[in-house]
Amino acid sequence: MDASRTHPGVAWEGIRCDPGGRIAARTDDISIGQTDETPGGAPRSAKIAVFATQSTGMTTETAPHAVHDAIPGTDPTPERRQDFIRQIVRDDLAAGRHAAVRTRFPPEPNGYLHLGHTRAIWTDFGIAEEFGGRCNLRFDDTNPAREDPEYVRAIQDDVRWLGYDWAELRHASDYFEVFYLAAEQLIRQGDAFVCDLSAEEVRAYRGSLTEPGRPSPYRDRGVEENLDLFRRMRAGEFADGSHTLRAKIDMASGNINLRDPALYRIKKVPHQNTGDAWPIYPMYDFAHSLSDAVEGITHSLCTLEFEDHRPLYDWCVDKVNLAGRPELLKPLTEKGFPLEAAKPRQIEFSRLNLNYTVMSKRKLMTLVQEGLVDGWDDPRMPTLQGIRRRGYTPEALKLFVSRLGLSKQNSSIDYSVLENTLREDLDARAPRRMAVLDPLKFVLTNLPEGHAETLVFANHPKDENFGTREVPFSNTLWIEREDFAEVPPKGWKRLVPGGEVRLRGAGIVRCDEVVKDADGEIVELRGTLDLESRPGMPGAERKIKGTIHWVSAMHAVAAEVRLYDRLFDVADPDDDSDGKTYRDHLNADSRRSVRGWVEPAAATVAPEQSLQFERMGYFVADRYDHRSDAPVFNRSVTLRDTWAAKA
């Protein structure tokens, strides 16, 4: 088996295996902790799944077949996917509760999507697709102070990159008039009131987990007074923070979310879509639940931290009853929106927790604003823009979340599981090329000066459909400096003075002379090529222990190669028990840039083309900086897990 596809010591979700493939420990209860995301944000955990072979070690080659016989880059067919949400959907359709499935992916446009969102996108769009339904992309843009059109564009780009398209593009701001009418309806029903308490006073009145809250002194205002105050809030008469519209539910509820939560607040901030039209904005829980109802969402899928918000979600949906009050939807129908309101059902699943990273939007924003990374699309960032630039493929990400599945159990995934999935995907889809990143000149003295010829190499050793390419060869080569040892360690199989090694696809060479500079540094090797060992010659069968790669110095193209690694050097950068913050755990070796040499067929690939640089790792032509005359490559992942020994 190809050693690059065997990864001992891998921790699949819920299970940790030792290098022999034996279960070493369970990780069910490990949790990085919650971040400050929203339901449309980032799911970060999943069910326990065991991917192990019966007698051999765990590998990315055999492990997936234990679950669904997947081939690299594929997702199990809808008929074979099994999880609790899909079972709910099947049951609902079988019982006739819904004629068709409608879901939505509802991010807030206040930051870039990250790895955790992959599960939400795969779930929302995937379930709609599997059951012949439709999924909207809806921006829950109710907090204009933190939102930006830049994020809107990036989110749309990310969703399309992952291979999904939305039935309709919606915004919560499309429904602001509906929300306002719904709020007035709640006031008329006696289910909402205008409160004059400050934010600090509201917190003091709210109570605690062990003590009930106290009613606001403004809770018993009459309907007419509340309507008058709310309309004056709408007219912009009051200052920010001076009034809120609150639901009238239960200040003694054991669920603090039901202790008369705010539905509207005054915020005189221009909105990216509505401009200065609104000095008041709906709170997230109110707008989110009613947006789902407006769009006729059947299954409102969100993450576990919103399980405690579900009673409030249902309260808003039931009390407003948009499906039974079409007059509240008149502002939309007059604009041509379809009348499709219905009662949605909220279902929660666990977040996708990965170690060696942070996925809080606030912390990611800090990394960018403080210049600790090179922007939101820095290839070290867990943002989808970043990992795309790093060379992760949509197929690898979807295969990753597909294997993890969905559950209500929080757990933590070892980052190597994600990396191994990428290795598996790129092993199948990445053409091979040769590149030398730390060059040492090697002159073949038994070939004429200026000698040049063309060799033919397969683009992929395991798939002839990739075809072949021409690789130039000459009497002067670049080889990796680490492939030569003047004083070799025990077990060394590569080049030594007086020793032989096979040049990949070219023949067997011997090192005859080592040339050093005035400081004693090796600057050049000289040797000979065994002409009887060329490909197709009888001597090519001669047994040689080591094989190294090379590029022709006469033809190679100089390239910038960025060697990326994990952004953090500890498994849980959020753990501040030692007095350190995530900033203190940034990996100093997470980015290193070198000048190397690549064969011409590597330089001419298109941006975002993934390659395996033989014996070096998987790389991608940079999305923005790569040009054929000035190639730039980013390392996506090493051939083998280099972090297992550090764990």
Image (cartoon, helix red, strand yellow):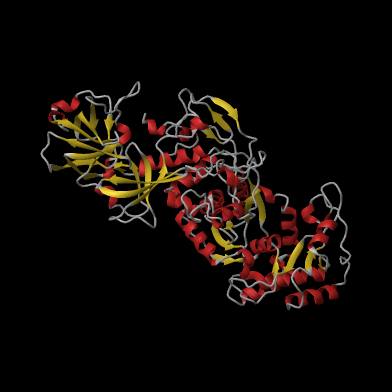
Q: Residue at x 68, y 49 (%)?
A: 305
**Left or right of 181 in this view: 377:** left
Which of these two is toward me, 14 or 642?
642
Occupied quadrant, residue 626? bottom left
Residue 552 in picture, x, y percent from top left: 21, 42
Q: Does 200 appear above or below 581?
A: below
Q: How many marks?
A: 0
Q: Is residue 328 left or right of residue 62?
A: right
Q: Position of residue 140 (x, y in %)?
A: 62, 63
Residue 72 visible from this viewpoint = no
Left or right placement of residue 635 versus residue 340 in this view: left
Q: Residue at position x 41%, y 42% from top?
A: 425
* Residue 234 placement: quadrant: bottom right
Residue at 77%, 77% in the rendered image = 232
Q: Position of residue 327 (x, y in %)?
A: 70, 74
In the depicted structure, whether residue 108 falls above or below residue 116: below
Quadrant of the drawing holding the N terminus: top left
The answer to whether residue 397 shows anywhere in this view is yes
Residue farthest toward the top in the current orientation of the protein: 490
Q: Could you say where residue 177 lies in the image, as x and y percent from the top left? A: 67, 73
Residue at the far front in the pictured view: 518
Q: Nearer the viewer, residue 621 or 459?
A: 621
